[in-house]
Amino acid sequence: MGKRIIVDPITRIEGHLRIEVEVSKGKVKNAWSSGQMFRGIETILKGRDPRDAHHFVQRSCGVCTYVHALASVRAVEAAAGVTIPPNARLIRNLLHAAQFQHDHIVHFYHLHALDWVDIVSALKADPKKTATLSENVSNAPWGGSAYYKEVQQRLQTFVDSGQLGPFNNAYWGHPAYKLPPEANLMASAHYIEALRLQAKSAKMHAIFGGKNPHLQSLVVGGITSVRDLNPDRIFQFLHIWKETQKFIEDVYIPDLLAVASFYKEWGAIGGTGNFLAYGDWPSGEKEPDTFMIPRGRVMNRDLTKVLDVDQEKITEDVQHGWYAEGDPKHPFSGVTDPMTEGIKYEPGDKSRFLFWKTETGKYSWIKAPRYESEAYEVGPLARVLVAYAKGNKAVQDVVNSTLKKLDIPADALFSTLGRTAARGLESVLIGGVMDDWVMELVENIRNGDTATYQPWEMPDEGMGYGLNDVPRGALGHWIEIKDKKIKNYQYVVPSTWNLGPRR
């Protein structure tokens, strides 16, 4: 038996993930990913009014709250046969796209970039050389040697105090870091600027959503923000969008390319084979044909064809989950029945959490989603690959251009490097169409169309599902209504696709 290494919690997500690996002779021999928290929102929803579901499911995540609400209201609308007005579709598209802009910036700078950027190394940088570097690779609105010297002094204050704050507990100085000090200082400065921006970009949700997180304007039948459809509010949204999009194009993408140029070997690390995307951002009633980001599957890295996605072929397995035994089930018939017997608690090695161990091979609260019994990766890379393989010209152009700039082969897409790049590239593409939606909304209002809600009646019974593609990947909610109440509710989230246990 090899050496066991446990990382628990994985703090750059919500903190509920545990990774355990067994290493032998410098190679990973075995590995387990497990979710360490049971939420049980599906159980909480039973017997409640379907119109309340989206308020509960938003609490599934402290960051991606809106996307759960969107999938939920879509599920109820499908069960009730509701078609929302065009203005509601546009506002939902804008809120959904704003989520992507905010999320991808936070992910790159504040969650992921510290794997590539050595913060402490930035203290050795020459601010003047850093300013020159920034002028060559970035169109950032701030810069100059005085600016970078001030950032360096702020970092030095952290180090001198012995309290690195958000930069604590890292592997500073490790030889795996490859950026020169000047690049590290530039990236550190942009990390700080991105913190300021992400606080501002979150206001886009508050403008048409009432607040952030846990937006309040989304309802079954449309949007309740009709009073916000005035020039001042729309201009405010447009102003923040422009600033955010400019940061993505002038800072985020140049930083992404600059960092990637030093870590090209990561183009051969961390790849999978199957990719699934639900797609999103409808431009009309015919879905998914009108989606800006298309729906589809790529299997075995074969980009010559895109396969269909049929939600009826999705199942969840609980063989290794802490749930009552049962065969793989489609979400409509899914059961969230936690085990209550046969579990013993033992402190996990090198873990601050208690690890639940059983004699049955169960080790996680995460179920195992499968499509026709196959595992799939979901998320930015899956969306980009499906769109690329389907011939989406905008996606093909930006992907091919990026591969050429980095001088790396197309196979590098199937990797950690490709996955990281996909977030940035789709940020540009999705953000780039938001002004079109704003102008379409303005034109509708100018023509006297201010409807944002379609009245409807709750059916005595019905079944529906709501799919959307969110920053982390394919998200689906399924609901069964009986006697105008929720009889069953299940949802399959991106993390379960990507981090679910084996089967």
Image: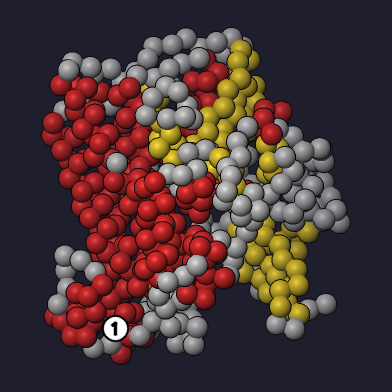
Q: Is residue 125 above or below residue 89?
A: below
Q: What secondary structure is marked by label 1?
A: helix
Residue 248 visible in the displayed image:
yes
Q: Which residue is mark 1?
A: 182
Instruction: Count the numbered circles shown.
Output: 1
Near mark 1 (Cα within 10 A), the count class, few <14, some 14-19 or many ≥20, is many
Q: Is residue 83 above or below residue 145?
A: above
Q: Residue at x 24, y 69 (%)?
A: 138
Q: Residue furthest right?
A: 359
Q: Position of residue 315 (x, y in %)?
A: 71, 37
Q: Nearer the viewer, residue 96 or 313?
A: 313
Q: Looking at numbered disc 1 in the image, what kind of residue is underneath it?
A: Glu
Q: Position of residue 51 (x, y in %)?
A: 48, 22
Q: Residue at x 52, y 15 (%)?
A: 80
Q: Residue at x 19, y 34 (%)?
A: 234
**Is residue 258 rendered to the left or right of residue 136?**
right
Q: Residue at x 56, y 61 (%)?
A: 414
**Is residue 245 rendered to the left or right of residue 21?**
left
Q: Position of residue 49 (x, y in %)?
A: 53, 20
Q: Nearer the viewer, residue 179 or 317?
A: 179
Residue 475 visible in the displayed image:
no
* Image quadrant occupied by the N terminus: bottom right
